[in-house]
């Protein structure tokens, strides 16, 4: 089935990653992508990964939050409220893993598989012409260069890292379409809705920081 992306830049990156210069992009084409990295606060970055994913994820660029703001095996909970504190403000939602549940011990694990995987990930930054025709929203500071609705087409994603996304990403609703997700990182994401939170149940690893 042919995919129609809303974001020109996202499609451009997907085409480069898959080696599809012209023609349609199908669901079969993107089925190889298992890892998605997004950052929008200090510049815009997209990253994709494929192939066999490591059993244990310990990212080299994660910092201390990966070891003190993460929760393992969320499948043991029946509701999100059992392991996440939710604060709702007028125009934003704040999430935090309950402090008494946080993993506090860092285990020494073989990181060789992780290093091999990270070396295979390709990271993209937009060029100046990728912003052509886009106008910044003075309320949210979004340019509309990314649409999280495009993420739903990557059905085989197992790892999603939203690492410092104060603009462009304001909803986790796309998670509802990702049935294979194992690991989720939500860092500095300015959420406007609580859609998609139920998909945080059943994860191998959930990391929420500065949110």
Image: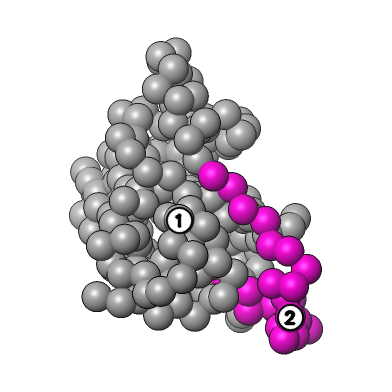
Q: Nearer the viewer, residue 4 or 97?
A: 4
Q: Which residues are magenta?
A: 122-146
The image position of residue 195, as x and y in percent, is: 39, 73
Q: Which residue is rendered at x = 49% and y = 80% of the image?
A: 6
Relative to residue 162, is residue 206 depicted above or below?
A: above
Q: At numbered mark 2, what does the secondary structure look like: helix, strand or loop?
A: loop
Residue 70 appears in the picture as rendered: yes
Examine the structure image and report whether residue 135 is included in the region drawn in magenta. yes
Q: Residue furthest front?
A: 22
Between 96 and 152, which is closer to the camera in this rendering?
A: 152
Front residue of 24/83: it is 24
The percent position of residue 77, horizontal first and vertical second, equals 24, 49
Residue at the spot 67% in from the left edge and 56% down from the top edge: 125
Instruction: Name the quadrant containing residue 131.
Output: bottom right
- With 77 as the anchor, is 109 left or right in this view? right
Question: Which residue matches tag 2?
Answer: 132
Percent across and percent down for residue 62 are 58, 36
Tell me how many marks there are. Answer: 2
- Which mark is drawn over residue 19? 1
Q: Secondary structure at mark 1?
A: loop
Percent x, y for residue 76? 21, 43
Query: Residue at the spot x=31%, y=51% of the render?
Result: 32
Quadrant of res 111: top left
Q: Nearer the viewer, mark 2 or mark 1?
A: 1
The C terminus lies in which quarter of the figure? bottom right
In the picture shown, does residue 194 fall above or below 166?
below
Q: Is 140 within the magenta?
A: yes
Picture quarter containing residue 2? bottom left
Label 2 and label 1: CA atoms lie apart by 24 Å
- Disc on the earlier residue, 2 or 1: 1
Q: Residue at x 21, y 54 (%)?
A: 78
């Amino acid at each position: 089935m042919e995919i129609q992306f809303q974001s020109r830049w996202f499609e451009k990156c997907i085409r480069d990653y898959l080696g599809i210069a012209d023609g349609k992009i199908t669901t079969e084409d993107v089925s190889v992508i298992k890892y998605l990295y997004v950052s929008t606060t200090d510049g815009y970055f997209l990253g994709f990964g494929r192939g066999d994913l490591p059993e244990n994820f310990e990212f080299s660029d994660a910092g201390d939050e990966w070891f003190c703001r993460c929760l393992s095996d969320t499948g043991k909970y029946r509701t999100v409220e059992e392991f996440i504190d939710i604060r709702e403000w007028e125009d934003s939602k704040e999430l935090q893993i309950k402090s008494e549940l946080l993993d506090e011990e860092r285990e020494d694990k073989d990181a060789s598989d992780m290093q091999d995987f990270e070396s295979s990930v390709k990271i993209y930054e937009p060029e100046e012409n990728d912003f052509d025709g886009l106008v910044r929203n003075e309320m949210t500071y979004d340019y509309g260069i990314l649409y999280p609705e495009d993420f739903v087409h990557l059905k085989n994603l197992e790892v999603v890292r939203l690492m410092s996304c104060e603009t462009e990403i304001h909803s986790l609703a796309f998670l509802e379409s990702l049935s294979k997700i194992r690991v989720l990182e939500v860092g500095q994401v300015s959420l406007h809705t609580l859609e998609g939170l139920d998909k945080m149940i059943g994860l191998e690893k959930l990391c929420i920081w500065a949110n």
